[in-house]
Image (cartoon, grey):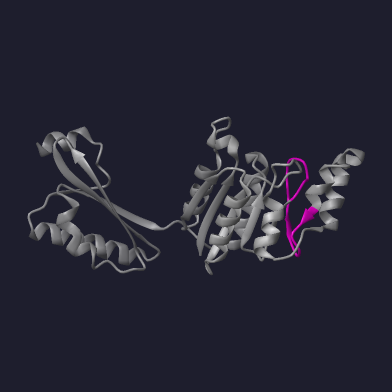
């Protein structure tokens, strides 16, 4: 699965509000052995929202969490655009969503709040633990939640528990090579595609170093490949240290 995050809100881009969704979703995915494929923070612009939603829809492996824009004010555009892009049909009154909104607000549900019950056809509801106004999902792949973290984050957690019930964090090994990452490209090119390889260059005093990280679901395979890296460096007289040591002053002093 390719996980996309779309955070909709001009108030974040103009710094009237601080984003709290990126850190939350990226951490929740990592806990389950997954990661974000892409994350967007976009303003309340209809054409831009359409383009981003269409991009996600075009990915057959895409799973999207969209934050914001499902309320009843004029700048809340997400529900209608979601209906257009993901169903090709107009919004439709969702009776259960209507019942929840009326139960929560009574007469004050009319004439505006009730519009939040107008959802894309065949939408499934996401429970809102704060005020009972639901988010919604489509085809079990595209999830639409409010911009308020207290409402949105429990919805996302429940969705992830359903999507990834058995997933666990990836097993990861990291080392710091006291050389330029350019000297390690040959061995890096041999790492299997099913493993996650990360090479982060850094400077240690005036010396180049590279932090190499390998991760995967097979612990033995990760251990085997980290040993191959060590053997490769040993043969070429390249020093290394276990772990990410890029900001370790003692390492830089010893490497001078």
Count of residue discs: 0
Front residue of 239 and 144: 144
Residue 165 visible? The answer is no
Residue 122 among those drawn in magenta: yes
Q: Image check: 148 left or right of 23?
A: right
Residue 1: x, y in percent?
A: 51, 65
- Give the residue furthest to the top: 16
Residue 127: x, y in percent?
A: 73, 51
Q: Image check: 194 left or right of 185?
A: right
Q: Quadrant of residue 20?
A: top right
Task: Say which residue appears at 84% left-offset and 46% top-offset.
Answer: 114
Bounds of the magenta segment: 118-134
Residue 246: x, y in percent?
A: 24, 41
Residue 31: x, y in percent?
A: 49, 52
Residue 169 visible? The answer is yes
Task: Say which residue appears at 67% left-offset and 57% top-offset.
Answer: 82
Residue 215 among those drawn in magenta: no
- Give the residue furthest to the right: 107
Q: Quadrant of the C terminus?
A: top left
- For residue 173, above or below residue 249: below
- For residue 24, above or below residue 181: above
Task: Say which residue appears at 54% left-offset and 66% top-offset.
Answer: 58
Q: Quadrant of residue 68?
A: top right
Q: Image check: 62 left or right of 221?
A: right
Q: Main secondary structure of the magenta part?
A: loop
- For residue 161, above or below residue 60: above
Front residue of 216 and 120: 120
């Amino acid at each position: 699965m390719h996980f996309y995050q779309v955070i909709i809100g001009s108030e974040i881009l103009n710094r009237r509000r601080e984003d709290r969704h990126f850190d939350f979703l990226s951490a929740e995915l990592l806990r389950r052995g997954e990661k974000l494929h892409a994350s967007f923070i976009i303003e309340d612009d209809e054409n831009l929202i359409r383009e981003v939603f269409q991009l996600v829809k075009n990915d057959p492996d895409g799973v999207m969490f969209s934050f914001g824009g499902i309320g009843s004010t004029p700048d809340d555009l997400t529900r209608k655009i979601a209906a257009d892009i993901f169903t090709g049909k107009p919004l439709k009154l969702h009776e259960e969503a209507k019942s929840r909104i009326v139960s929560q607000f009574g007469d004050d549900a009319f004439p505006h709040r009730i519009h939040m019950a107008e959802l894309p056809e065949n939408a499934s509801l996401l429970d809102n633990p704060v005020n009972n106004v639901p988010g919604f999902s489509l085809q079990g792949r595209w999830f639409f939640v409010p911009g308020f973290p207290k409402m949105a984050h429990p919805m996302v957690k429940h969705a992830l528990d359903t999507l990834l019930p058995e997933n666990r964090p990836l097993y990861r090994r990291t080392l710091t090579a006291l050389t330029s990452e350019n000297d390690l490209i040959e061995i890096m090119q041999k790492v299997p595609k099913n493993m996650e390889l990360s090479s982060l260059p850094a400077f240690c005093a005036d010396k180049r170093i590279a932090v190499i990280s390998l991760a995967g679901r097979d612990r033995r395979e990760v251990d085997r490949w980290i040993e191959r890296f060590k053997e490769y460096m040993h043969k070429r007289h390249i020093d290394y240290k276990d772990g990410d040591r890029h900001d370790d002053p003692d390492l830089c002093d010893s490497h001078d």
